[in-house]
Amino acid sequence: MALKPESISLTKKAAAAAEEKLAKDVVALDLSNQGILADVFLIVTGANDPQLEAISTEIQLQLNKVGEKPIHREGTGGSSQWILLDYGDVIVHIQHPEVREYYALEKLWSDCPKIELHG
């Protein structure tokens, strides 16, 4: 199944919001041909808990402006090292560097193409 244009648009908006809060290593993976529920994983790194929260808040704020609210959130409001925002077709992973390295989602989904975020 082809990646939906609205999924690409939502991903780019979320990535831009993350970058506003200085997220690092912003990567979007096209999962549309994998037969799972989501079309896209957006993976970003934040240096510490306050930055993870700031990135999460900014993404939610910017996507709310275009009528999108997360279906589910995990890891917010505490000392989580991984915040997940589920927007249905787009899943946002906001991780500490060590968590990102340990779980290596990019390696796990290495057969999936990356989505160009700036263009």
Image (cartoon, rainbow, N blue to C red):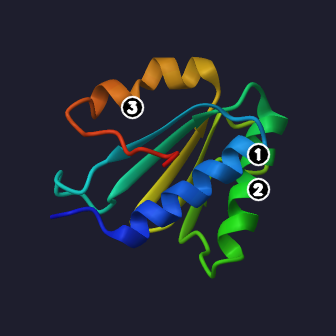
| Left or right: 5 as drawn, with respect to 64 | left
Q: CA distance from mark 3 to mark 1?
A: 23 Å
Q: Is residue 113 above or below residue 96?
A: below
Residue at image mark 2: 58
Q: Is residue 92 above or below residue 48?
A: below
Q: Say which amino acid is labelled 3.
A: Leu
- Callout 1: SS: helix
Q: Nearer the viewer, mark 1 or mark 2?
A: 1
Q: Please report contact status of discs 1 and 2: CB closer than 8 Å, yes or no.
A: yes
Taking the spot 15% from the left edge, 64% from the top edge, the residue there is 1
Q: Position of residue 48 (x, y in %)?
A: 78, 27
| Left or right: 28 as drawn, with respect to 39 | right
Of 32 and 71, which appears nearest the observer? 32
Residue at image mark 3: 105
- Callout 3: SS: helix
Q: Nearer the viewer, mark 3 or mark 1?
A: 1
Q: Position of residue 50 (x, y in %)?
A: 84, 37
Taking the spot 65% from the left edge, 50% from the top edge, the residue there is 16
Residue 36: quarter of image? bottom left
Residue at image mark 1: 20
Taking the spot 31% from the left edge, 69% from the top edge, the residue there is 4
Tell me which numbered mark, 3 or 1, is placed earlier along the sequence.
Answer: 1
Tell me which numbered mark, 1 or 2, is placed earlier along the sequence.
Answer: 1
Q: Say which amino acid is labelled 2.
A: Glu
